[in-house]
């Protein structure tokens, strides 16, 4: 007589104690091997006859299936255990280790800090932040801004072009290329800023780099004036560099603004150039499909790195993009 229920209970509890595959092989031979109870009961079956034999046969078969099921689930458990030791789960929320000291925590790059603040200031003033392509067409970057192919004002920014594009596409030289692009797709009034990287053929020095970030501002509406431009810039610069900061306009020339000015800020007793600005040239508004009888606008553009070096008192703008952790750690 074989007691299936107690055999199954026994093998189940042993199977939970298995530590590895070797233990599993031993357990399998104990319950299914040649010397197992099951094997001898099977052998005894030959001596039985008729209904008795059939009944015991069914019982033994079902016991065998149960044993195999227990062994199979033990095997799966052992394989899972093996995988876990191979691929240790790790806590993605645990703090990272930095290069030289365990306690060092990372932070935003100075340029990102300035940009973050810029977005905050302009959003509070009701400006929308507009995304823009870094590869621009010659038309939007120059032509639409009153700089045809032979215009000398191109020279200042003349630049890299995209190979095989017949000089029709270029890494944009300024974010102003977004002015007409935006006008063509939106109806005034609007107030936007366009942050982004620009690229120029530039002789690098402490205040110039061949690639840097700009923030372009564009406001178009009814009765927008030069006084609005100065008022807005004063507010913005004070928010960004501190309440004591003064600004001044110097006459300048950009083919796409009329009149045009350079924007300087007096910071810590020194006048520093921030960028260019002016009233959007009527021809530019027209190229953007805007009715110049009804609307006028102003635009400005400055370098984000410039603001960062002023704000954080950095003597050479090129340091910002050198991979020197000791330098970046100071901010
Ligand atoms: N695009 C100019 C530059 O890169 C700055 C500028 C923007 C001037 C908008 C006038 C109006 O220097």
Image (cartoon, rainbow, N blue to C red):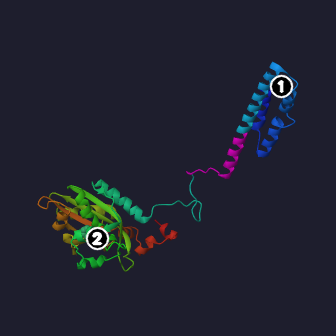
Image coordinates for residue 220, horizontal then vertical, percent:
20, 59
Element type at mark 2:
helix
Q: In this view, does 3 lie above or below 212?
A: above
Identity of the residue drawn at 65% across and 51% down: 88
Q: In this view, does 189 lie to the left or right of 73?
A: left
First to last magenta residue range: 74-93
Q: In this view, does 262 lie above or below 117?
A: below
Identity of the residue drawn at 83% across and 31% down: 38
Q: Distance between the residues labelled 2 and 1?
A: 91 Å
Crowd around label 1: few <14 · some 14–19 · many ≥20 (10 Å): few
Identity of the residue drawn at 38% across and 72% down: 211
Residue beneath disc 2: 138
Q: Does the magenta stretch include residue 23?
A: no
Identity of the residue drawn at 56% across and 55% down: 95
Element type at mark 1:
loop
Q: Is residue 247 visible?
A: no
Outermost top residue: 51
Image coordinates for residue 15, horizontal then vertical, percent:
76, 37
Q: In this view, does 35 lie to the left or right of 173?
A: right
| The label number, if any, that marks residue 2 in the structure image | 1
Q: Predominant secondary structure in magenta?
A: helix
Occupied quadrant, residue 57? top right
Pair 2/1: label in front: 1
């Amino acid at each position: 007589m074989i007691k299936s229920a107690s055999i199954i209970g026994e093998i189940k509890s042993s199977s939970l104690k298995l530590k590895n595959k070797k233990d599993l092989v031993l357990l399998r031979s104990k319950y299914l091997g040649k010397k197992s109870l099951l094997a001898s009961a099977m052998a005894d079956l030959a001596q039985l006859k008729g209904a008795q034999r059939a009944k015991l046969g069914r019982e033994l078969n079902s016991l065998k299936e149960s044993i195999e099921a227990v062994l199979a689930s033990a095997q799966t458990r052992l394989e899972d255990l093996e995988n876990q030791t191979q691929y240790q789960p790790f806590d993605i929320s645990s703090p990272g280790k930095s290069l030289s000291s365990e306690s060092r925590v990372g932070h935003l790059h100075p340029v990102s800090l300035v940009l973050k603040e810029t977005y905050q200031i302009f959003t509070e003033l009701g400006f929308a932040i507009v995304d823009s392509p870094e590869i621009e067409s010659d038309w939007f970057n120059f032509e639409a801004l009153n700089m045809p192919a032979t215009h000398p004002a191109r020279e200042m920014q003349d630049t890299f072009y995209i190979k095989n594009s017949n000089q029709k596409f270029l890494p944009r030289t300024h974010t102003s290329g977004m002015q007409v692009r935006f006008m063509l797709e939106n109806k005034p009034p609007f107030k936007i800023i366009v942050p982004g990287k620009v690229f120029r053929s530039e002789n690098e020095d402490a205040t110039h780099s061949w690639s840097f970030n700009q923030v372009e501002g564009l406001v178009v509406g009814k009765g927008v004036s030069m006084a609005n431009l100065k008022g807005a810039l004063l507010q913005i610069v004070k928010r960004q560099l501190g309440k004591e900061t003064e600004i001044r306009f110097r006459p300048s020339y950009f083919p796409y603004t009329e009149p045009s000015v350079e924007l300087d800020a007096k910071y810590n007793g020194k006048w520093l150039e921030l960028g260019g600005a002016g009233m959007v040239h009527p021809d530019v508004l027209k190229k953007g499909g805007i009715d110049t009888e009804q609307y006028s606008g102003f635009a400005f553009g400055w370098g984000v790195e410039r603001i960062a070096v002023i704000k954080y008192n950095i003597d050479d703008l090129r340091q910002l993009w050198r991979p020197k952790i000791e330098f970046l750690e100071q901010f």
